[in-house]
Image (tube, grey):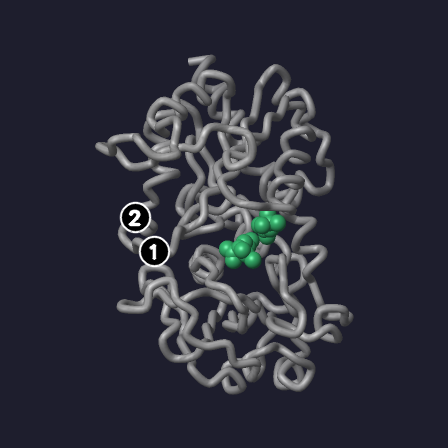
Amino acid sequence: MNKFTTVADIGPLDKAVAEALEIKRNRYAHSSLGRNYTLLMIFFNSSLRTRLSTQKAAMNLGMNVMVLDVNQGAWKLETERGVIMDGDKAEHLLEAIPVMGSYCDIIGVRSFAGLKDKAEDYEERVINQFIKYSGRPVFSMEAATGHPLQSFADLITIEEHKTKARPKVVMTWAPHPKALPQAVPNSFVQWMVAAGYEVVVTHPEGYELDSAFTEGATIDYDQRHALAGADFVYAKNWSAYADPHYGEVLCKSRDWTVDAEKMALTNNAYFMHCLPVRRGMIVTDDVIEGPRSLVIPEAANREISAQTVIKRMLESIQDNRND
Ligand code: AN0
Ligand code: CP
């Protein structure tokens, strides 16, 4: 595997989940695979889970790990080509990327959507430049339009907890005070449809996602109707995708908050969220603390999804060297 930015990169999902569960049973089985290999994790944005779980995953494989927070201590990076660099940015991504590639074997990149220029975000300009110019396998740690390590962990979690072959998985929009990217919901829907589940997306009008990601899912503007019979409820906020409101917050109504009364409409559903979550906005305390909340096991599975992806990248590097 030379890149991991979307569900297509991982191949058949049943195989990927089986491999992940095998890793979970013995996460130190391949502790020599990464010996003398270095992972470089590059963060353009904040993180708790991705930072720790991915580092742990690489350490389980025996790798060395370096972490760079671009906005804390590195030179400010220009990302546009053809710019006269007379402002505050001291270095261009086009030099920085191959330099960073020269110090490591695999690169993870976190680079959120700017939510100002839809074309720039949806062309994935930042992570695609890493893929093109680093000379290294690159994986997304949440890029502009997707968060595949999160969705892979979500899939593992659902496979561990489902009690029927094809559960009903409902992703509901929920309110948040700030504009958030569409990356997590885009990926989640795409992965859940690819897994063959019954997928329903519910959100207020104006929050339609890019149809390239929601193909195969049912859209329902009535949250209560959507939640009826759900086996899994996945809450998430995102900002508007549709023009002319790209990146805007159109609704902050707490009528959309997931609470016990709404969970009572479901088939005793599990509650999921990628975290970090704002209590009282996205979900009430009793639901997130309740016995059907999966938020902690879901976060724990981030170590497993990352380890599966990094293991496959190490195996590809070693296969190529042995050719
Ligand atoms: C980010 C987002 O919604 O994309 C990261 C989630 C994993 N969330 C926030 O910025 C709060
Ligand atoms: N879920 C997730 O990616 O969390 P962080 O932003 O803390 O990494």
SS at badge 1: loop
Residue 214 is left or right of residue 167, and the answer is left
State the separation of the CA atoms marked 1 and 2.
9 Å
Q: Which residue is mark 1?
A: 116
Name the amino acid type tagged 2: Glu
SS at badge 2: helix
Task: Identify the residue at horizontal 40%, vertical 69% (top origin).
Answer: 217
What is the crowding at mark 2: few (fewer than 14 residues within 10 Å), some, or many (at least 20)?
some
Q: Position of residue 208 (x, y in %)?
A: 36, 71
Q: Which mark is residue 319?
A: none
Q: Is residue 318 visible?
A: yes
Q: Which residue is mark 2?
A: 120
Q: Is residue 153 visible?
A: no
Q: Position of residue 10 (x, y in %)?
A: 46, 42
Task: Identify the residue at horizontal 76%, vertical 69% (top origin).
Answer: 289
Task: Identify the residue at horizontal 32%, vertical 60% (top origin).
Answer: 212
Choose mark 1 or mark 2, whichever is in front: 1
Q: Position of residue 91 (x, y in %)?
A: 38, 26
What is the crowding at mark 1: few (fewer than 14 residues within 10 Å), some, or many (at least 20)?
few
Residue 298 is left or right of residue 110, and the answer is right
- Above/below status of 161 relative to 1: below
- Above/below status of 167 relative to 256: above
- Most foreground residue, 102 or 319: 102
> In which quadrant of the rendered view does residue 242 lie?
bottom left
